[in-house]
Amino acid sequence: MSAPASPPDASDWAARYLGELATQRQLSPHTVGAYRRDLAELAQLAGHHDWARLTHFDIRRFAARLHAGGQSARSIARKLSGWRGFYAWLSRQTALPANPVEGVRAPKRPKTLPKALPVDHAVQLMEANTHGHPEPAELCNRAMFELLYSSGLRVSELAGLDLAYQDAGKGTPASLGWFDRAAGEVVVTGKGGKMRRVPVGGPAREALDAWLAVRPPSRDGSAALFLSARATRISPRVVQARLKDHALRAGMPMHVHPHMLRHSFASHLLQSSGDLRAVQELLGHASITSTQVYTALDFQHLAAVYDRAHPRAKSK
């Protein structure tokens, strides 16, 4: 009579799991390889311990060791997700009391500050290629870029602007955003359907007037303020591409995108006024918490000024 087969060890369970990922779930070799590396790291952390006996506290300890070893929160979160999936599978193969990875969270990711242009770079960007007799497309670009920086609009809000308020017609919805030329403001509908009015600065109004003087009729009959080369409402993607090209020609040392102009608007306004509530209203943030991130940018600006100007700032 033959001896009963011994139960699979950890490496056997891992091999079975990876095999199912490749054959039954048909994951790519690259993805399966990532799971293999994550399970190998779990095996290294577990050492001689039986994987089936690892506890919630063991997994938390392993995550802490990875973090102390310099691994990013994003990387640890991915590994925890992989381990969680493995244990969910293992619980279906064995009498596993509980998934030890459930409830274990990766360390909080550090908040990245929004990237804003320095004031001199913002001015350089706005004033680039403003001489001579520009074509209508260039006048459209100048008006869009000035308005993004002047009023802190989201690119979707900019693309959705109409020439003026349009009443709802047959099959046509009322305007969600428009240029109020008499008031020198734009009215936009932001996130959550919240409508706000934002002032338009002098240079932006001048750029808009120059564009409106040459704006052709739209091909689709829409009242869109900004038009594409096909004379239809411009899309956010086209605005992004045009701004990127304009920034390259202006000699900007960084990649410039529409949301960077929104960040620049908020940061520069806060530097000048210090009025966080006003910036919140102009940006259309529902919570002041979203706006407070710009105080960190303001502090960075003040710290840079201190480092340049204070005679005792630099160590000898």
Image (spheres, grey):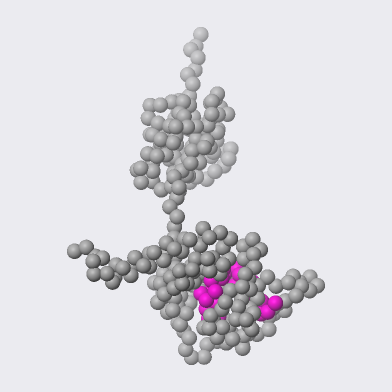
Q: Picture coordinates of residue 215 (x, y %)?
A: 63, 85
In the visual, does 212 lie left or right of 312? right
Look at 57% across and 87% down and name the residue there.
210
Is 262 rendered above or below residue 218?
A: above
Quarter placement of the C terminus: bottom left
Q: Is residue 144 magenta?
A: yes
Q: Is residue 234 visible?
A: no
Is 160 rendered above or below residue 2?
A: below
Look at 53% across and 69% down and name the residue there.
278
Nearer the observer, 294 or 210: 294
Q: Picture coordinates of residue 77 (x, y %)?
A: 47, 44
**Number of marks in the rendered image:** 0
Is 14 rendered above or below residue 242?
A: above
The picture quadrant where one finds residue 211 is bottom right
Magenta part, dominant SS? helix
Q: Residue furthest bottom?
A: 132
Look at 41% across and 66% down and name the residue there.
298
Q: Is residue 221 visible?
A: yes
Q: Which residues are magenta?
A: 141-165
Look at 40% across and 26% down and name the residue there.
49
Q: Residue furthest top?
A: 1
Is 102 rendered above or below residue 97?
A: below
Nearer the observer, 257 or 316: 316
Q: Picture coordinates of residue 63 (x, y %)?
A: 42, 39
Q: Residue furthest right?
A: 170
Q: Is residue 271 magenta?
A: no
Q: Picture coordinates of residue 116 (x, y %)?
A: 44, 68
